[in-house]
Amino acid sequence: MDSRVIAIDGPSGAGKSSVSKRVGKQLGFLHVDSGALYRIMTWQCLENGIDTSDPAAVAAFAQGVEVECRPEDGAIAYYVKGETPGDRIRTPEINAHASHVATVKEVRERITAILRGMTQYGDLVVEGRDITTAVFPDSPARFYLTASAEARAARRQKEEVEKGIANQSAEAVKASLLARDKIDSTRKYAPLRKADGVLEVDSTSLTLDQVVDAVLAALPADWKTA
Ligand code: DC
């Protein structure tokens, strides 16, 4: 049987990761963080002195970056030269460069092919910016998760402090998040947008459980009992 894909898009901090992980765990679908692949490409560019504002340089370099994908503990884990990137791809520096790298057509094509190839591992819940519109547009389970900019910034700031990644003010986190949203939603190739036919869930005043329940309730009936 073909594998089933739950596709979840939305801006930074809308809660995509928490929701996708929970939905995946509940249904036994593998969680796929597509943003991590864009972050890995960005990290590798920076490590190798590639100017992320030069699309031709990024495109040429990205062709040679090998990312190994392995199903592990309910998710697809990524390895670069045998190492997991971990929180090295979650820094404010990577945040600032990733949107630029994600504008590059060749990078998007490469990552789209990697993501589509993951169906070989089974059923998936994939989160990102173009999953419902470009990577898996034919999925019968597509969602657009949003929240107010303030709520999104507050979540991201808390996460950065808790993980010891950074200690920025809420204002600084909000400014960086809005700058990324703008680049992500106005770029030429596969911009972030709410596709026709997706279910929009605004998580601003919902608990995680409520958002997870809204997603589960909207799935095709036989996906919930499989
Ligand atoms: O979700 P995130 O913050 O980890 O994403 C990192 C960057 O990658 C962000 O600028 C959006 C971009 N991205 C994308 O263009 N398409 C995706 N499917 C996922 C992320």
Image (cartoon, rainbow, N blue to C red):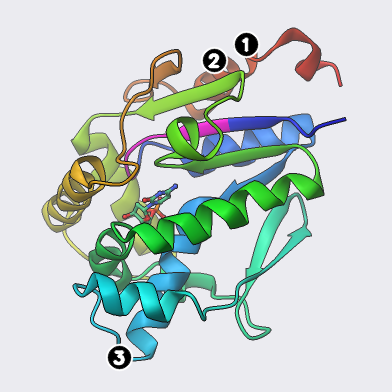
User: Does residue 9 belong to the magenta stretch?
Assistant: yes
Determine which of the numbered discs, if any, sits on residue 49 in the image. Answer: 3
Residue at image position (42%, 40%) is 130
Question: Of marks 3 and 1, which one's residue comes earlier in the chain?
Answer: 3
User: Does residue 108 belong to the magenta stretch?
Assistant: no
| Image height of 49 relative to 154, above or below | below
Q: CA distance from mark 1 to mark 2?
A: 5 Å
Q: Which residue is mark 1?
A: 217
Say whether mark 1 is within 8 Å of ligand 1.
no
Q: Position of residue 56 (x, y in %)?
A: 27, 74
Circle 3 Cα neighbour tier, 10 Å, few/some/many (<14 / 14–19 / ≥20)? few
Q: Which residue is mark 2?
A: 214
Name which residue type carries label 3.
Gly
Nearest the viewer among 21 and 154 is 21
Q: Position of residue 185 (x, y in %)?
A: 23, 40
Q: In front: mark 2 or mark 3? A: 3
